[in-house]
Image (cartoon, rainbow, N blue to C red):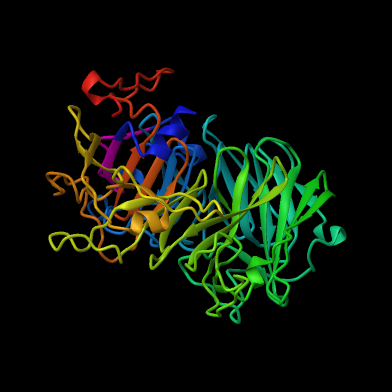
């Protein structure tokens, strides 16, 4: 609860600016707990064809989950080498795809609360992040995507067959064709060519059936063994969004969203079906769309994009909770903002927009703004206090920064868009916004960046650098020894306490 309150208020306890690079080990300590025989890397010097002096040129961020950030050191050139950095204990683990041979492309990856997965063709290698063990298994046909949940893996094959595997267990086949959740067809990534999504609304990791106007995806229960959810979205005129709950190979329940927002004529931009967590309590965003006013002057208000009555562009997130089994529609007013870089968490929309220009001294830098959801009640009022902006200043220990509040003026945009606060992830408002350390490369002006996070961390990734805001206990102040089971966390001094 403390973490949620801190995040909704923007009051991070500590911050860190760092860079993706194998040479940037001043903060992380390379763990040797994963045996070399099981794909663990104990020294980057031992990795074949890896040139350390170039290992920070083309890093590629993969994913974030539960305090861990996974990335490739050299982008597409060496996808069989993956690095997982744990922000909670400053431990870095590196994994080599076993027996990769000359294959250097086409590796699928996934990461959950306990497992990290790399797969290629029909072979999947699964590392347990807590037990430091590797187990491998193979599916009968080439797979298209794998999903991690708890200590289990769900595999989607190209022929739309589904397989479940639990760490230490046996492979289980789920006959989805008998369950009739979707037709038996070839599975492809992204959306069909006739239905192009806007790139900023969803990742291309979604799936669709090649011969049907149907998007499919899957959520694996992180707590209950043998339970997963199959999601389908019809791209025809119905826009039907359906969630099937599968328990032990049988359909236990079917849930259909009543509001057909995806096919609504006011929907101007449509995203692909690709779930993302929106809270720590079973909430998932399945798809996002943008709605705008229809342009008609209807006395009944049917031309309004939002039920609150405001004629404004809205980012609409269609969500489902796997525990309450209920759908939720989140609406956030955008105005002229573009959701190119955005992240929804605990109903808040964290968004960075390049149209939000700052003074001429830093025209390419802009803050992350937190937007409250629309309550569907149009009761705008005068804002009595200015919108806070939190930036970072140097702490008395290396790498760690602390919070500082600075003046922030955005005019009437804050009231119109329900802006609650701003977070300075690029140090625009800091006294010294320069990047001097070699392990903190300058943010890219070409890469648009990405926002990820949860209750504990909010991360702005702008490869080859990134900024982490911690809403938990901060970061450990020392490097943990390999035999230590307990880490000492930074305790804020009186003058560092929340203000």
The magenta-colored residue range is 15-30
Q: Is residue 134 above or below residue 183?
A: above
Q: Is residue 478 magenta?
A: no
Residue 206 position in % (x across, y down): 59, 63
Q: Using the image, determine if residue 413 lies above or below residue 87.
A: below
On-image quarter of the C terminus: top left
Horizontally, residue 408 falls left or right of residue 172, namely left
Number of numbered discs on residues: 0
Horizontal side of residue 211 vs 386, given as left or right: right
**Viewer-side residue, 349 vs 455:** 349
The quadrant where residue 10 appears: top left
Report the residue that reaches farthest toward the right.
Answer: 178
Please state which of residues 104 and 184 is positioned toward the viewer in this rendering. 184
Q: Is residue 226 left or right of residue 403?
A: right
Task: State the residue in front, 112 or 7.
Answer: 7
Going 80% across and 68% down the picture, which residue do you hit?
A: 183
Q: Position of residue 186 (x, y in %)?
A: 71, 71
**Is residue 82 something one can see in this rendering?**
no
Quarter location, residue 403: top left
**Quarter-wise, where is residue 388 in the image?**
top left
Instruction: From this view, report whether residue 284 is shown above or below residue 444.
Output: above
> Of residues 352 and 222, which is closer to you in this image?
352
Location of residue 107 in the rendering, given as x and y in whole percent from the top left corner: 52, 58
- Magenta segment: does it hold 23? yes
Instruction: Determine the residue positioned at 38% across, 62% down.
Output: 77
From the viewer's perspective, tell me whether residue 13 is left or right of residue 185. left
């Amino acid at each position: 609860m403390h973490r949620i309150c801190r995040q909704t208020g923007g009051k991070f306890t500590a911050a860190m600016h760092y860079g993706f690079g194998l040479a940037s080990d001043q903060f992380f300590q390379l763990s040797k707990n994963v045996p070399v025989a099981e794909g663990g890397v104990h020294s980057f010097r031992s990795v074949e064809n890896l040139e350390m002096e170039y290992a920070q040129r083309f890093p590629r961020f993969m994913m974030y989950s539960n305090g861990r950030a996974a990335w490739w050191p050299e982008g597409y050139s060496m996808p069989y080498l993956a690095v997982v950095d744990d922000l909670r204990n400053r431990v870095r683990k590196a994994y080599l795809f076993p027996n990769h041979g000359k294959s250097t492309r086409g590796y699928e990856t996934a990461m959950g609360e306990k497992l990290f997965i790399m797969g290629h063709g029909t072979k999947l290698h699964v590392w347990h992040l807590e037990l430091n063990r590797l187990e491998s298994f193979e599916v009968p046909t080439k797979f298209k995507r794998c999903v991690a949940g708890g200590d289990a893996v769900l595999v989607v094959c190209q022929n739309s067959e589904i397989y479940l595997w639990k760490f230490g267990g046996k492979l289980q086949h789920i006959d989805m064709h008998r369950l009739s959740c979707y037709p038996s067809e070839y599975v492809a990534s992204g959306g069909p060519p006739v239905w192009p999504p806007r790139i900023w609304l969803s990742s291309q990791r979604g799936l669709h059936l090649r011969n049907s106007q149907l998007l499919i995806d899957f959520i694996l229960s992180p707590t209950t063994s043998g339970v997963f959810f199959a999601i389908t979205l019809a791209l025809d005129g119905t826009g039907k969004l359906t969630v099937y709950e599968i328990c032990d190979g049988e359909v236990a329940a079917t849930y259909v969203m009543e509001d057909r927002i995806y096919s609504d004529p006011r929907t101007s931009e449509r995203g692909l079906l690709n779930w993302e967590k929106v809270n720590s309590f079973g909430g998932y965003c399945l798809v996002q769309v943008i709605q705008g006013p229809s342009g008609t002057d209807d006395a009944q208000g049917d031309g309004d994009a939002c039920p609150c009555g405001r004629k404004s562009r809205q980012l609409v997130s269609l969500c489902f909770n796997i525990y309450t089994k209920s759908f939720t529609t989140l609406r956030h007013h955008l105005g002229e903002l573009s959701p190119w870089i955005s992240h929804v968490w605990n109903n808040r929309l964290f968004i960075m927009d390049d149209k939000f220009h700052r003074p001429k001294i830093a025209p390419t830098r802009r803050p992350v703004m937190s937007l409250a959801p629309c309550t569907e009640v149009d009761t705008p009022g005068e804002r009595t206090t200015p919108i806070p902006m939190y930036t970072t200043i140097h702490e008395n220990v290396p790498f760690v920064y602390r919070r500082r509040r600075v003046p922030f003026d955005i005019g009437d945009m804050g009231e119109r868009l329900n802006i609650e606060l701003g977070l300075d992830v690029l140090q625009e408002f800091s006294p010294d916004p320069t990047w001097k350390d070699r392990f903190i490369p300058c943010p890219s002006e070409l890469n648009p960046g990405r926002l990820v996070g949860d209750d504990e961390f909010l991360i702005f990734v702008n490869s080859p650098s990134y900024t982490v805001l911690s809403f938990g206990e901060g970061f450990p102040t020392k490097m943990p020894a390999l035999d230590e089971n307990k880490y000492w966390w930074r305790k804020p001094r009186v003058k560092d306490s929340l203000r």
